Image (spheres, rainbow, N blue to C red):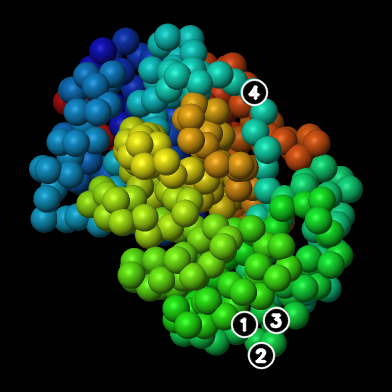
């Protein structure tokens, strides 16, 4: 069935994509959040012209041909826009075959262990600790990630001494029955990252994410080689050449592709396959409760080299107000620390009509 119509529904942060085939069947996807209104323009200008009137089941062809046609525009925005098309087409295929995307990818629906992921740096160690304890009691989380350093901080902390305080504070309060992860968001030089890494080792932290500027692969590999804990990264990378380099050179212990940043499920599955062949685990980045978390849930239930857990945002209306009221059905319930992939066709998501009614609407269609 050929693609006849591509519609977008957008605000500044979120853009949902609806693809309609010639028989009227529809699939829903999403571009990456943040400046999603810009990505929507890219989708209509640089993606839709090559997708309309093409076979809606030939997703591999489309995610390959569009970057070739737009070869003068490599980079994040084009991949984000392709991801909106790709994820909508997977939903469309799932509905056509009455299967979840997870099953289409070779997996089975079921539960996934989640870790409670904090995005906050403007929070005291004491308040972060209290929040984690409450979430453990309410939802059964047994894994938590918190922030250290400052984002792209050039070795500076969010405020002096915060990193050295928050690591032992959380480790002591939560004890050895939980898994603890940290994210430095490209803060450190290799020497400082290794210094901080030894503090993490001493307090039982198992996961050190993006210790150095993410584009400096050699720096990250230095840190990985110097530490006994897992050094991880990859969320920002959207070019397949970078992924080949990262995996072939074993820059990190665990890779963290983001389905929406990378350009959809098809491309992420290719990266996961490369990692599988290299014996590397995949713990994707999915730092908000838009469809990216649902995409990641389906992915993790389908790949043999899935990491230990699903990233799950714990931020409320005060931090990510735009991630709420997007869906009419419940997608992200956490019970006993687990999320669940259902057997609903496609992604199993129902976009909230009230949200759609308030969004900016655009359409590209076969004339």
- Marks 2 and 1 sit apart, C-alpha to C-alpha, by 7 Å
Rendering coords of residue 9 (x, y %) = 43, 41
The residue pinned by badge 4 equals 110
Q: Mark 3 or mark 4, which is nearer the start of the sequence?
A: 4
Residue 101 vs 170, above or below: the answer is: above
Q: Is residue 71 above or below residue 327?
A: below
- Which numbered disc, 1 or 3, marks the residue that appears first in the sequence? 1
- Closer to viewer: mark 4 or mark 3: 3
Q: CA distance from mark 2 to mark 3?
A: 9 Å
Q: CA distance from mark 2 to mark 4?
A: 44 Å
Mark 4 residue element: strand
User: Which residue carries the number 3 mark?
Assistant: 164
| Residue receiving disc 1 | 158
**Residue under the image location 75 percent in, 80 percent down:** 165
Find out whether the residues at labels 2 and 4 contact each other: C-beta distance under 8 Å: no
Q: Nearer the viewer, mark 2 or mark 3?
A: 3
What is the crowding at mark 4: few (fewer than 14 residues within 10 Å), some, or many (at least 20)?
some
Above or below residue 363? Residue 155 is below
Considering only order in the chain, which callout, 4 or 2, is on the residue closer to the N terminus?
Answer: 4
In contact (CB < 8 Å): disc 2 and disc 3: no
Count of marks placed on residues: 4
Q: Residues within 10 Å of mark 3 (few under 14, many from 20)?
A: some
């Amino acid at each position: 069935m050929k693609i006849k119509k591509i519609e977008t529904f957008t605000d500044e942060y979120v853009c949902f994509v609806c693809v309609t085939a010639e028989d009227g069947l529809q699939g829903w996807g999403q571009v990456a959040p943040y400046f999603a209104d810009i990505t929507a323009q890219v989708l209509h200008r640089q993606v839709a012209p090559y997708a309309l009137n093409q076979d809606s089941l030939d997703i591999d062809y489309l995610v390959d041909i569009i970057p070739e046609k737009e070869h003068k525009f490599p980079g994040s925005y084009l991949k984000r826009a392709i991801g909106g098309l790709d994820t909508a087409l997977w939903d469309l295929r799932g509905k056509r075959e009455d299967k979840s995307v997870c099953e289409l990818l070779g997996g089975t629906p079921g539960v996934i262990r989640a870790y409670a992921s904090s995005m906050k740096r403007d929070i005291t160690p004491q308040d972060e600790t209290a929040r984690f304890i409450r979430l453990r009691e309410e939802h059964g989380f047994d894994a938590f990630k918190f922030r250290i350093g400052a984002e792209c901080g050039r070795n500076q902390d969010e405020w002096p001494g915060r990193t050295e305080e928050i690591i032992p504070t959380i480790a002591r309060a939560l004890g050895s029955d939980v898994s603890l992860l940290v994210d430095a968001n490209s803060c450190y030089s290799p020497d400082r990252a290794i210094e901080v890494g030894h503090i993490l080792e001493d307090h039982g932290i198992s996961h050190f994410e993006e210790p150095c500027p993410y584009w400096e692969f050699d720096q990250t590999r230095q840190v990985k080689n110097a530490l006994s804990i897992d050094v991880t990264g990859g969320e920002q990378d959207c070019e397949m050449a970078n992924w080949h380099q990262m995996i072939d050179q074993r820059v990190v212990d665990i890779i963290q592709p983001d389905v929406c940043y990378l350009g959809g499920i098809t491309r992420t599955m290719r990266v996961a396959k490369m990692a599988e062949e290299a014996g590397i685990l995949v713990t994707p980045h999915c730092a908000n409760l838009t469809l990216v978390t649902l995409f990641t849930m389906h992915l993790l239930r389908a790949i043999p080299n899935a990491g230990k857990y699903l990233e799950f945002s714990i931020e409320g209306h005060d931090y990510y107000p735009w991630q709420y009221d997007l869906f009419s059905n419940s997608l992200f319930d956490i019970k006993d620390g687990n999320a669940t992939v259902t057997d609903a066709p496609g992604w199993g998501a129902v976009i909230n009509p009230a949200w759609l009614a308030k969004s900016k609407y655009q359409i590209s269609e076969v004339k």
